[in-house]
Image (cartoon, helix red, strand yellow):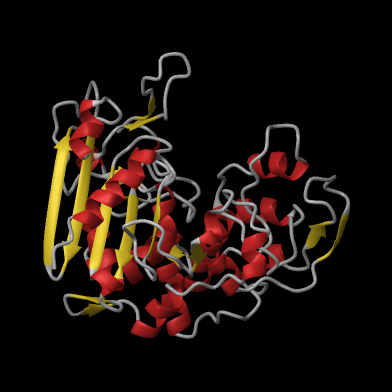
Amino acid sequence: MIERLVASGFVPGVVAVLARHGEVHIETTGDLAFEGAGSTTPMAGDTICRLGSMTKPIVAACAMTLVEDCTLRLDDPVDDLLPELADMTVLTDPHGPLEDTVAAKRAMTLRDLLAGTLGTGMVPAEPGTVPIADALDTLGEPPPDEWIRRLGALPLIHQPGERWMYDTAAKVTGVLIARATGMSFGDALRERICGPLGMKDTAFSVRAEDIGRLATAYERDNADTGEPVVEDTPDGRWSRPPAFESGGGGLVSTADDFLAFASALLAGGTRRGERVLSRPSVTLMTTDHLTPAQKAVSGFWPGYFDSIGWGLGMSVRTRRTHLGPSVGAYGWPGFYGTAWYNDPAEDLSAIFMMQRAHAGDQRLPMWLDLWTAVYQAIDD
């Protein structure tokens, strides 16, 4: 399956990892790039890839370490650490003028941030058609204090707790973690998650000495030819520390590193004797937190929540519709073609790493085939 993706020219290389019952199988094919630097460097378990939205589960795990040490509480308002988001207003019409608002009925909480119910998020819309979508698109990624100030100056789209919305909540969570710990968001992740699990290549930028291991990222396609177009090179965006360390999708990592994270969650929060979370925290993170009413008005892909729920920072499978994943499986994909799911019922972790936007869209036929290939291979 992955050789076919490379042979067809869809991506230059792929890494696939399956871990089950203590056995780990890594399959690699292709190179880091189609041309130029990396075009003769084979993909490997330590190839560095942009995680995109697969950043979100790591962010949620870090936030839960702060809940465990009682620095934060799930249902306390976040106003004290994020005063920019206090006393928010809410649009009377999600598609209407930014000035037409009412007061928020309550403050947003950490639970809202982790469950995606804070009241704002991505709004798919053509430019110039929805005022709040245009305003959110202009936030940019300035330093965290400026970013949260800009966000707080905008109204919420919905009342806190009313419905699930994507992406922005994870970015807010990163700012909250930085302020709660008194250190940069990246340093907090390193101290609480990445360091203890040995995730040495997981960060918001790539060290100069490791640039040669960063795969080239490609656009989805050229509108005229259908051929991939370079979106980011190894010496591009991730070659230097960003002004804004985005919890929504800013991390780079490797298959090896992400397996360490996935294995820790599957084992109830511990790996090789190093505990980063309690088993109850993992259970809470991987439980569906959305009500039927919240799913019904989510506005996400039509029918998506028919078989999926949302835990804390990741999706949770609520109904089995294909060979796999099983009910109770959890995980999330990323914009550039990374994907990860743990399936406790099968004692399985599965990770794919490639670098082409938006190959992370799990509705693509290639993903249905890849997950079919994973589950048909299970031999008890």
Is 344 placed above or below 295 here? Answer: below
Residue shown at the point (19%, 26%) measured from the top left: 39
Which of 169/280 is in front?
Answer: 280
Which residue is rendered at x = 25% and y = 40% of the image? Answer: 208
| Residue at the image point whose x is 13% and y is 63% from the top | 379
- Please give left or right for residue 101 compared with residue 263 in the image: right
The quadrant of the rendering that contains the C terminus is: bottom left
Residue 278 shows up from this direction: no
Q: Which picture quadrant has residue 132?
A: top right
**Residue 149, position as x, y percentages in the image:** 68, 55
Residue depicted at 29% across the width and 72% down the height = 344
Left or right? Give the position of 82 relative to 323. right
Q: Residue furthest top?
A: 224
Residue 234 at x, y = what percent? 30, 33
Residue 276 shows in this picture: yes
Percent position (x, y) of residue 130? 75, 40
x, y (%) of residue 172?
Answer: 57, 60
Asked which quadrant contains residue 363, the reply is top left
In terms of depth relative to the viewer, which is nearer, 20 or 244?
20
Find residue 323 and report its image quarter. bottom left
Q: In the rendered image of this protein, does residue 138 appear above or below residue 298?
A: above
Residue 18 vs 47, above or below: the answer is below
